[in-house]
Structure formats: structure tokens, C-alpha cells
Image (cartoon, rainbow, N blue to C red):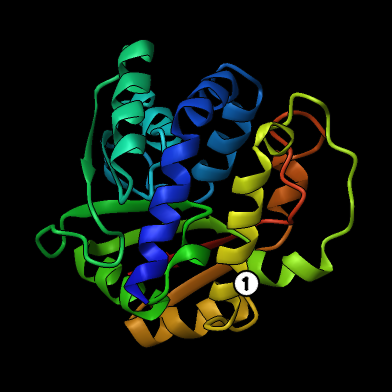
Amino acid sequence: MELIKHRVSHYWSHRAEGFETQRLREFESEKKDRWLAEFRKYLPQGRTLRVLDIGTGTGFFACILAEQGHETTGIDLTPDMVEHAEHMAAVLGLDASFQVMDAENPEFEPESFDVLVTRNLTWTLPHIAKAYQEWYRILKPGGVLINFDADYCAALEDEEEVELPDNHAHKLVPDFLTKENEAITMELSAYQQPRPQWDVQLLVEAGFERICVDMGVYRRIYAEIDEFYNPTPIFTIAAYK
């Protein structure tokens, strides 16, 4: 199972530079305000929060929340991603810290964070149940996990064909990486059950008591088929400790 983590990290090492460029454009687009609107549905208001962005990639969520005045840290398994996250934060003039770290084994003390956020990460984890248990451990009482993800493994077969614009990231990925992504997805699908139903079950088992699922978020974030469009419908899971 650990081999799959290496494959995922290696895949994203190839995409880190281009991914930062696109996330910078997304940060300057109307998408940033749409993401903020979704966050505000769940974030505690009126105080500075300690936030951990898990699987931060090039730091998009960490930078959005740092710009709002929160104390943000991002972790990612891929060193190249962390390097580009640090660069992205520097380009934007934002104070956010980043570390190379396994999302399933976060090296933080119990009850370290008010908020955990993550985007398109949990579907890549071979031990999702363990990750949710660890995330519960490092979350403060009353804190919230906000997880944006999709059932990407199921979508590999069910996804409808959508004509994407020429500047879409999927159009710019070389064939060997596209094939590797499909192979990774096929391997992960053997370990997963239908989502987000499975996630809710695992979150309850991890100790989370109040869980909200929003299946309509993708319509609000991806209202247009543009370079940022995600053809797989994402959901939001907000789980409170």
C-alpha cells in the first residue's frame, strides 16, 4: 500500500510547476471568492483560527485563509509541491508555513488546530480511516474538518465526456502522466467504497459527532467550463469534533 503513496507523490512532482501557475491564476480569479463563500459556511467567525491545509499542493487553500488573517500551515507528501507552495505564498506576499508530511501521519500534538481543510486529497489515501482518526486527534474540541473531494474512482468509468477548453490543465498533461493517473485511480478503486457515504461512516467511527454533506458545491464553484473546471462533481463534508 505504501507504494501507491510513492506513485502519487511522483506523479505530482511532474505537475508541480504547472500546477502552481494555474493555482496563482485561480487565486486571482472569481473562484477565490467562491471558495471563500463555501468556507464561511463552516468556519468559526470573529477570531483568528489556527488552520491546517492537508495535502496543500501549491498552497491554494492555505493562501486563501492566510489572506483572511488566519494562522495557516500546509502539509504535502510531495517535496516539489511544498517548494512551489512556499514560492506561491511569497509571490502573493502571504504569511503561511509549509512542511513535507504524510497526511495519514500528521506530526502534530493533539488538539493543535481549530480548522482542517483539504481539497481532492482523501481519494488518494490508501488508509482513509486512519487519516480521519489522526485528523480527529489533532483537531481542537469544537473544531471542524472541511473536506472537498469527489468519488474519483467511481468517476473513472461513469464520467460523462465534457469538451474542455484548450487551456485546461487536463489538456496540458502529457499522455504518460494521464495514463499513470488512470492506473493510480484504478488501483485505489479496489480499496474504496461509494463516497461520500463511506466517508460519513468512517468519520463517525473516528469520533466526529456532527457531519454535514453538501452535494451541490460543484455547481457553485464550477459554474462555467473554463480552465479551472472540474468535470467530476465534488462534494463538501464538514465534520465537527
Q: Label 1 is placed on what type of residue? A: Met
What residue is shown at x 59% (from left), y 25% (from top)?
26
Within 10 Å of disc 1 (Cα), the crowding (few <14, some 14-19, many 20+) is some
The reply to whether residue 27 is visible in this rendering is: yes
Pinpoint residue 70: horizontal percent, then vertical percent: 29, 33
- Compared with 107, 56 (above or below) is above
> Furthest-front residue in view?
176
- Residue picked out by circle 1: 186
- Compared with 120, 198 (above or below) is below
Instruction: Identify the image quadrant of the N terminus.
Output: bottom left
Q: Quadrant of residue 142?
A: bottom left
Pinpoint residue 234: horizontal percent, then vertical percent: 67, 56
Q: Is residue 108 left or right of 49 when viewed as pictured?
A: left
- Compared with 191, 43 (above or below) is above
What residue is shown at x 82% (from left), y 33% (from top)?
224
> Furthest-left residue in view?
109
Q: Quadrant of residue 69?
A: top left
